[in-house]
Image (tube, rainbow, N blue to C red):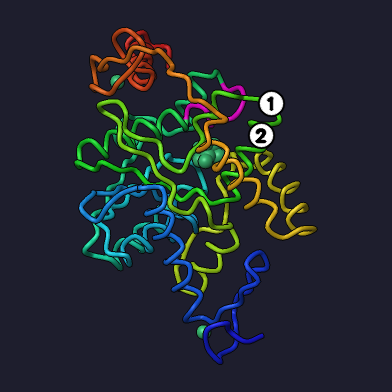
Amino acid sequence: MKCRKCDRQAVFNMRRHKLALCEEHYPEWFVAQAQRAIEKYHMFAPDDRVLVAVSGGKDSLALWDVLLKLGYQAGGLYIDLGIEGYSTPSREKVERFAAQRPGAEFVVVDLKAEYGESLPEVAKRVRRGRGKPCSVCGLIKRHAMNRVARDGDYGVLATGHNLDDEVAVLFGNVLHWQTGYIARQAPVLPADREGFARKVKPFCRLYERETAAYTLISGIDYIYDECPYAVGATSIGYKDILNRMEEESPGTKAQFYLGFLRARKAGFFCEQGDGIDLHPCTSCGQPTSAPGLCAFCRLWKTTDRQRVNGCI
Ligand code: Q46
Ligand code: ZN
Ligand code: ZN
């Protein structure tokens, strides 16, 4: 198959767009798509400082790469959660990527080094060893991202969520009619409260296989393995179902998601004010609804108390 734009052999075919491109024109198309989403949803401008949360996986590294290519002031943040067999190799991938781009700012938050416990350790303590550490992980990552964004004067926090991720979340929320979550799902979450950065997803209109093709063609080395705790996640089951639908009818996932965004814009899903009164945490200063300490600081205060009491 020939490239749509030149005479060369196409290396990637997008059935939903009926578009095949060569190894020169595909990356160009991909970068332009990201730029279109940034502009369409008013994510950020060239004078904004953007912090990219990088995990070592293909989507986040591709995002950092694309933003730097587009000339944005994009720094990277890697959070080392201390997950055995996963954190060390993924950190190495990110560090190597950053070293190849010496002009880009890069920050590592090492949980064990900074707070004394890895994610599995703190999750085991607070959840008494039951279940997966994902909810504690989410809390820790949100806190670290907000902290680094605030300390580094980043007004925007970008994540590599792609269209497959967004569709799986939407599908799950619709199945369970989580109306609050549905109303808040968007390519941009504005920084409507002081202390929070604006959150953006520039790849929300790009399929996972499109970001995979971009990293491959661009020679970006990433970690193939998922976090071991992702095994059996409900979202992976949803992705399988959605992939089967896509196979039958190319473009189904994009239709579902983009249709949702249009309905959202037309006001079908009104975001209710949560009515929650936020104030600064007395320890870290991040906004919290709890009196005194935020949920993150409470995690570690428990550690101090238990250590003093000799419980751990
Ligand atoms: S939440 Fe859970 Fe992920 Fe954290 S523990 Fe791993 S699977 S990394 S997106
Ligand atoms: Zn071409
Ligand atoms: Zn706090």
Q: Residue at x 52, y 88 (%)?
A: 6
Q: State the image quarter where residue 206 is shown.
A: bottom right
* Residue type indicated by callout 1: His
To which quarter of the image does residue 294 belong? top left
Q: Is residue 304 above or below residue 256?
A: above
The N terminus is located in which quarter?
bottom right
**Residue at (31% x, 15% y) in the render:** 278
Q: Which mark is residue 212?
A: none
The reply to whether discs 2 and 1 touch (Cβ–Cβ < 8 Å) is yes
Kindly state the secondary structure of the residue where label 1 is placed.
loop
Residue 40 or residue 131, whichever sits in front: 40
Majority secondary structure of magenta residues: loop
Locate residue 177, reporting x and y percent. Answer: 66, 25
Q: Is residue 130 above or below residue 13?
A: above
- For the question of whether residue 133 can be seen, the reply is no
Q: Which mark is residue 176?
A: 1
Query: Residue 57 at what x, y percent from top left?
Result: 49, 55
Q: Does residue 108 appear in the picture of this structure? A: yes
Which segment is the magenta one?
129-136
Mark 1, Cα crowd under 10 Å, few <14 / some 14-19 / many 20+, is few
Residue 308 inside the magenta-drawn segment: no
**Residue 22 occupies which quadrant of the picture?**
bottom right
**Residue kind at label 2, given as amino acid type:** Gly
Q: Say which element carries label 2.
A: helix
Residue count near mark 2 (Cα–Cα under 10 Å), binned few <14, some 14–19, many ≥20:
some
Report the Cα–Cα distance between label 2 and label 1. 6 Å
For disc 2, the marked residue is: 172
